[in-house]
Image: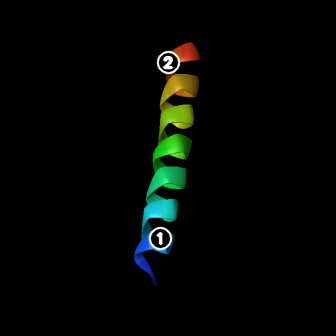
Protein backbone atom coordinates (compact mmCIF):
# COMPACT_ATOMS: atom_id res chain seq x y z
CA UNK A 1 0.00 0.00 0.00
CA UNK A 2 1.02 3.63 -0.39
CA UNK A 3 1.79 5.88 2.55
CA UNK A 4 -1.32 7.91 1.80
CA UNK A 5 -3.42 4.74 1.98
CA UNK A 6 -1.88 3.71 5.28
CA UNK A 7 -2.34 7.19 6.76
CA UNK A 8 -5.94 7.24 5.52
CA UNK A 9 -6.67 3.92 7.21
CA UNK A 10 -5.02 5.14 10.40
CA UNK A 11 -7.17 8.28 10.46
CA UNK A 12 -10.35 6.32 9.81
CA UNK A 13 -9.38 3.74 12.42
CA UNK A 14 -8.69 6.40 15.04
CA UNK A 15 -12.01 8.10 14.34
CA UNK A 16 -13.91 4.82 14.64
CA UNK A 17 -12.05 3.97 17.85
CA UNK A 18 -12.84 7.40 19.28
CA UNK A 19 -16.52 7.02 18.39
CA UNK A 20 -16.64 3.59 20.03
CA UNK A 21 -14.87 4.96 23.11
CA UNK A 22 -17.32 7.84 23.44
CA UNK A 23 -20.28 5.50 22.89
CA UNK A 24 -18.93 3.27 25.65
CA UNK A 25 -18.73 6.22 28.04
CA UNK A 26 -22.28 7.32 27.25
CA UNK A 27 -23.85 3.93 27.90
Instruction: Please identify the residue farthest to the front as the structure is shown.
Output: 4
Q: Is residue 21 above or below residue 16?
A: above
Residue drawn at point x = 48 percent, y = 52 percent? 11
Q: In this view, does 7 lie to the left or right of 15?
A: left
Q: Where is residue 21 in the image (x, y as percent from the top left)?
A: 48, 30
Q: Is residue 23 above or below residue 27?
A: below
Instruction: Please identify the residue farthest to the bottom as the structure is shown.
Output: 1
Q: How is the image coloured?
A: rainbow
Q: Position of residue 10 (x, y in %)?
A: 44, 58
Q: In this view, does 21 lie above or below 15?
A: above
Q: Nearer the viewer, residue 3 or 14?
A: 3
**What label does residue 26 carry, if any?**
none
Instruction: Choose the circle earlier in sequence order: 1 or 2.
Output: 1
Q: Nearer the viewer, residue 5 or 19?
A: 5
Residue drawn at point x = 53 percent, y = 42 percent? 15
**What label does residue 4 carry, if any?**
1
Q: How crowded is mark 2: few (under 14 residues within 10 Å), some or many (20 or more)?
A: few
Q: Which of 16 and 3 is in front in this view?
A: 3
Residue drawn at point x = 45 percent, y = 81 percent? 2
Q: Where is residue 8 in the image (x, y as percent from the top left)?
A: 51, 62
Viewer-side label of 1, 2? 1
The span from disc 1 to disc 2 (Cα, nearest Å) is 32 Å
Q: How crowded is mark 1: few (under 14 residues within 10 Å), some or many (20 or more)?
A: few
Q: Where is residue 13 in the image (x, y as percent from the top left)?
A: 49, 53
For the residues bearing labels 1 and 2, Cβ distance under 8 angstroms: no
**What label does residue 25 carry, if any?**
2
Residue drawn at point x = 55 percent, y = 44 percent? 16
- Mark 2 element type: helix
Q: Quadrant of the C terminus?
A: top right
Q: In this view, does 1 lie above or below 18?
A: below
- Mark 1 element type: helix
Amino acid sequence: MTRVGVIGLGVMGSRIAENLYRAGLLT
